[in-house]
Image (cartoon, coloured by chain):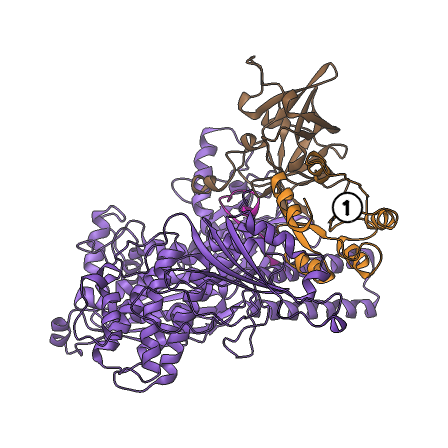
Amino acid sequence: MSTPSFGSDELAQFRRTFFEECTELLADLEERLGALAAFSSDVEGLNAIFRAVHSVKAGAGAFGYTVLVGFAHRFEALLDRLRDGKAELDERTLAALVAAADVFSALVDLARQGETPADDFGADVAEELCALLDGEAAPASAARSAASAPPAQPAGDRTYRIVFRPNAELFRHANEPLYLIRELKGLGTLTVDCDLSRLPPFDAFAVDDAYLGWTMTLRADCPPAAIAEVFEFVDDECELIVEEVGAVPAKPEEAVPAAVPEVTATAIAGSSSETKPAESKPSDSKGAGKSASISSIRVDLYRVDRLVNMVGELVIAQAMLAQQFTESHDQDDPGALQGFEHLAGLTRELQECVMAIRMQPVKSVFSRMPRLVRDVGHKTGKDVRLEMAGEQTEVDKTVIEELADPLTHMIRNAVDHGIEDAATRLAAGKPAEGVIRLSAQHAGSNILIHVEDDGAGLDRDRLLAKAIDKGIVPASAKLSPEEIDELIFAPGFSTAAAVTDVSGRGVGMDVVRRNVQALGGRVQVMSTPGKGTRFTLVIPLTLAVLDGMVVAVGWEKYILPLTSIVESFRPGRGQIRVIPGGGEVVSIRGEFVRLIHLARVFGVEEAVADPCQGLVVLLELANGGKLGVVVDELIGQQQVVIKSLQDNYDPVPGISGATILGNGRVALIVDIEELTRLHDRSARIADTTRQPIAANA
Amino acid sequence: MVSYTLKGAGFEVLEAEDGVKALGVLANTRVDLIITDINMPNMDGVTLVKRVRAGGNHASTPILILTTESGDERKASGKAAGATGWIVKPFAPEKLLSVVNKVCPA
Amino acid sequence: MAEPQDLPNAGPDAAAAQARQFISFRVGDDEFAIDIMAVREIKGWTETTVLPNQQDYMLGVLNLRGTIVPIFDLRCRFGLGLTTATRSHVVIIVAIGGRLLGLLVDAVSDILTVNAADIRPVPDVDQPIDNAFLAGIIPVGDSMVVLLSLENLFANHGPANAAIAA
């Protein structure tokens, strides 16, 4: 009888959690490693690094990433020696540790992507680790070099040692060890040994208590996960140890109540370090963890999301309630009104608290950057130092994950193109070593992230030439320095003379800007020739809630993002001009601003067509430009909970999301960045087909 | 769907519309396995599990709860109440049978 | 052993040779059916919020207890013209591929229990509705109910569409 891949959902969840932990552990490892200096006795640092490697190894074993486990084993062994003082942290060892950390991190990445590393991946580093462990002066002999990982388990049967000892709890839940053992038997060949040692004498025997344990050996062609699956209902009601047995049996581990059954791969002849008892890894706030005893708990992200959503619903429900109340009563019940105000205040506070749960320091993203700067510096032969500030600044977890790519790209660029080579710098009177400053700070309800270098600044002449060359601007264009700087964000624009493999391959600043805009933020650039360049990312702290202005267009209501609204006004006849080509502009305070009719963009009939009879809402776009949007009237300001259309439908151009108003109806949130493009497109269509749109131009 | 699959596999199946009726059936007949949904009128599945476990002739009978994929807390509260195991909806019939085998004599 | 009478589950293995259940409904003069496993809810028609610049069979979105669900006019999807929806029309909420969507139909008829073996293939006759949408014919009494393929009906809405929509 075969076991279907039942636990696949849960396995996927465990795996996700595991890789999240790996990210944190590896970040910590990097930091500690960076702080290690040769010949110092930083035992605490070594301990921390050891723990990180060990934790990753334990989880990797459970998922069967044998190459990773094998490498980790060696890495761990060396660290163990070092922290016990049995080996010395000399230059050579330190270099080996750094190299090992690199290989380790790469192996984790491969595992995360579901790829198997080549058999000799990191072989040279593994050899060096072996050499150091064996106290040899030079890298090893042929026998060692062949084995940079434990021998691949023979495809086919694997042998597991399973120790199973149920608690009384298990029986209370009507689980029956017999059936579970029977399931195991169905996986392969099973020998069972029952441990009767805990049976008390008859008169001390409690009918509903558990005294028996079983030690079993299973030979089966299945992964450890299949065994875990058999026990999935009872894993917290028993002691369970599942070990894969190789050529050298592992030392018996202490029986540890396991939230996740652990598997440790064993080492081949050679390094016979002790396997310390595996620390149990709480995968789901089950509380058994011996790891970090700061007062925090690990919580399934899914639960937090649910909480955030629920609070969002609460905000909507409370708004609906308030609306219904005001509609059905005159405002002459001060008690109830006060009650509603209080409720609204409490709800707002609750929402802030809940949003704060998902906030995390940007450190986790920043911490990858020093290594990046080192690597790119080496590749380009430049000497660059990275300074960081404000790593503790917090931002929503979902935003953090999206920050990694843009930041990586910008920093790569800064090293590759921004910072000059040493000779040029010295000639310009700058220190040979270039500096990049990465900083984060809060500003209002946004987070500001600066990437600043003290390099040569943007080469405006070259930028302009390139833009003209690519047809992005006409040859006769007169652009201010700032406008020239903005050109780097144009799609397909790359001034790298040769597309280096470091920052080339078509990933340009336009992608960065798009990514940041997708987060609801914007990118700005400031450059001084000869002095340097500074990029600033302005990103809202949270994605889920928006301060909106509800506007009416015909029978429909739309939401405009409040932070983008400069002002709104009813223009006089004289302020409206028609420009050649058919567009409209409105004159406001000396500027002419393009006018867009929302009714036309969204195909709304019966809307006010004449701006002088409706309202113009003046918006500021991400790139600093201005846009005037014609609506019928303003309904009011409201904080709205953003719901995505894409959960159940496709993206709709011009709409960035939806929300539920107090009256229960869905209102669409306008994507103001898209409006101009859509307006022009629909204008072209209107010219060719008959459309019931009131045209003013 | 559940009864269909089980009947097809040779089990004898008794059905009840909600928790209250289920308790009635259980009081009068001996069964080897109980499978319950969570969302039911009159008495939800978790409460049913608690009641069954509290005493009576089925306190040691295996109980399986049917839970949707997003029901992590349901699984946990079901377990805390004393459920033996769970089946995730939607499920394939073979899956149901394999889970039943884990908790019940064949 | 308590089972809900109403809320059905989502689809088990379709190839199983056991009986399957379908919900049948009427659009115009014809009867159609869909797998009961896909049906989440049945509700009366309420006004949707229109999404701009969509296909004409896409009626907009509804607030379903906090979830935003798109609603499609089946009559229009079949190329038979727009439905003038009133409160007596019915919206069937289905789940396909992890997404919820609503189908506007004239009325719900029945729950059919059919053996997989009794489902006839679609005849190769020329008819107004695109054959790709149809998954089979179910004989009921002396009339026929057309089994719909929900996946094919809405195949062009989904993650792949994201690239095109921009």
Q: Nearer the viewer, residue A685 or B14?
A: B14
Q: Nearer the viewer, residue A131 or A583?
A: A131
Q: Nearer the viewer, residue A204 or A3?
A: A204
Q: Position of residue A518 (x, y in %)?
A: 45, 55
Q: Nearer the viewer, residue A295 or A424?
A: A295
Secondary structure beneath dot 1 equals loop
Q: Position of residue A94 (x, y in %)?
A: 25, 77
**Which range is magenta?**
A638-657
Dividing the image into 4 quarters, which one contains the C terminus of chain B? Answer: top right
Q: Position of residue A572 (x, y in %)?
A: 53, 52
Residue in view at x 50 percent, y 48 percent: A188
Dividing the image into 4 quarters, which one contains the N terminus of chain B? Answer: top right
Residue on which the image places disc 1: C1
Q: Is residue C33 above or below residue A446?
A: above
Q: Is residue A251 above or below residue A504?
A: below
| Chain A, chosen colour in render | purple
| Chain C, chosen colour in render | brown
Residue A363 among magenta residues: no
| Chain B, chosen colour in render | orange
Amino acid type at circle 1 is Met
> Quick check: can you spot residue C137?
yes
Residue in view at x 37 percent, y 71 percent: A367
Q: Position of residue A547 (x, y in %)?
A: 58, 61
* Residue C150 placement, left or right of A537: right
> Quick check: can you spot residue A565?
no
